[in-house]
Image (spheres, rainbow, N blue to C red):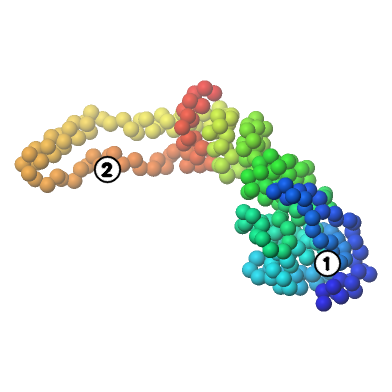
């Protein structure tokens, strides 16, 4: 049925350009897949929208997109059909990526290919479409292929230079490959602009690579001073506690039950609402070595 629909539509929708299979699978094997009956078509070319709607109606239902069940085949069988015809179909690429991330190894007998094959083909087919490159970087990051992920992100940044999340994730990858200076260069503008994701900053601090501003150092010193003043116990309070200890000891000697210990409440460490580590600047400053880092800088 669908083959007939595609053939009837070919007079209106012609091939945008070739879409060969390129690149390698993560296991080292070549990416080799089938080719569409018609097409391939660029997902960004909305003049083919009627054709896209027909393909999606038969092969990319909601159940297929969510990987619940297939429409004409298995979920990946239908997704493979969509991506052969429309290599950079964004939702289908996203579903293929989700499927591959769910499975450490591609299930034997499952139709289709690992996500890296569809993504590399899409990038080669539609080099001006930033979605496949960005998704490829995310996918490789999740697969812990950090160097490859960094390359993919840097390519995506050429198309999306102001994408904050892309820059943030690229910073995380730079930390993973120990390019701390470049990671810091990526991170500083993000946090100066108010980014409220402390993960990248935390990693840089733990690596000893975060460059504290004078304002940050002053804020932390102020917090330490306030904490120190709060921790000081007056001589009067000390004497009261000594008296309590003497009373408790005497009670034990008389065989009486131990009264409620007022010292327990004093020893319990309550969360300090003035602690700057509660905010994005400071969540990282709880790491060991922060005092030395501030002092040295």
* Extreme residue toward the right, this view: 11
Q: CA distance from mark 2 to mark 1?
A: 68 Å
Mark 1 lies on residue: 49
Percent x, y of residue 81: 78, 65
Percent x, y of residue 6: 86, 71
Is 225 positioned to the left or the right of 211 in the image? left
Q: Is residue 13 visible?
A: yes
Q: Quick check: 223 above or below 96?
A: above
Mark 2 lies on residue: 265
Is 195 positioned to the left or the right of 269 in the image? right
Please identify the quadrant where the N terminus is shown: bottom right
Q: Residue at x 37, y 30 (%)?
A: 228
Contact? badges 2 and 1 (CB < 8 Å): no
Is 165 positioned to the left or the right of 117 in the image? left
Label disc, if present, on residue 209 of the rendered structure = none
Sequence-first disc among 2 and 1: 1
């Amino acid at each position: 049925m669908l083959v007939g629909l595609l053939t009837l539509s070919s007079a209106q929708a012609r091939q945008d350009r070739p879409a060969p299979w390129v690149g390698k699978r993560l296991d080292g094997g070549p990416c080799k897949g089938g080719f569409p009956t018609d097409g391939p078509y660029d997902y960004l070319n909305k003049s083919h929208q009627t054709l896209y709607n027909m393909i999606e109606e038969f092969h990319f239902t909601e159940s297929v997109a969510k990987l619940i069940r297939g429409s004409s085949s298995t979920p990946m069988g239908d997704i493979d059909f969509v991506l052969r015809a429309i290599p950079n179909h964004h939702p289908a690429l996203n579903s293929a990526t989700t499927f591959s991330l769910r499975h450490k190894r591609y299930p034997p007998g499952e139709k289709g290919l690992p996500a890296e094959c569809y993504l590399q083909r899409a990038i080669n087919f539609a080099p001006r479409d930033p979605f496949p490159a960005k998704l490829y970087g995310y996918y490789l990051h999740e697969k812990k292929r950090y160097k490859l992920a960094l390359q993919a992100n840097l390519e995506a940044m050429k198309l999306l230079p102001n994408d904050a999340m892309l820059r943030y994730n690229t910073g995380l990858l730079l930390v993973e490959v120990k390019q701390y200076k470049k990671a810091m260069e990526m991170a500083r503008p993000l946090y100066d602009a108010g980014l409220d994701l402390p993960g990248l900053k935390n990693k840089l601090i733990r690596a000893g690579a975060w460059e504290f501003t004078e304002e940050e150092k002053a804020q932390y010193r102020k917090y330490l001073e306030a904490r120190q003043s709060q921790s000081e116990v007056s001589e009067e309070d000390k004497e009261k506690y000594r008296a309590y200890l003497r009373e408790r000891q005497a009670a034990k000697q008389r065989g009486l039950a131990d009264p409620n210990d007022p010292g327990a409440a004093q020893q319990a460490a309550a969360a300090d609402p003035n602690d700057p580590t509660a905010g994005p600047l400071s969540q990282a400053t709880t790491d060991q070595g922060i005092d030395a880092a501030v002092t040295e800088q």
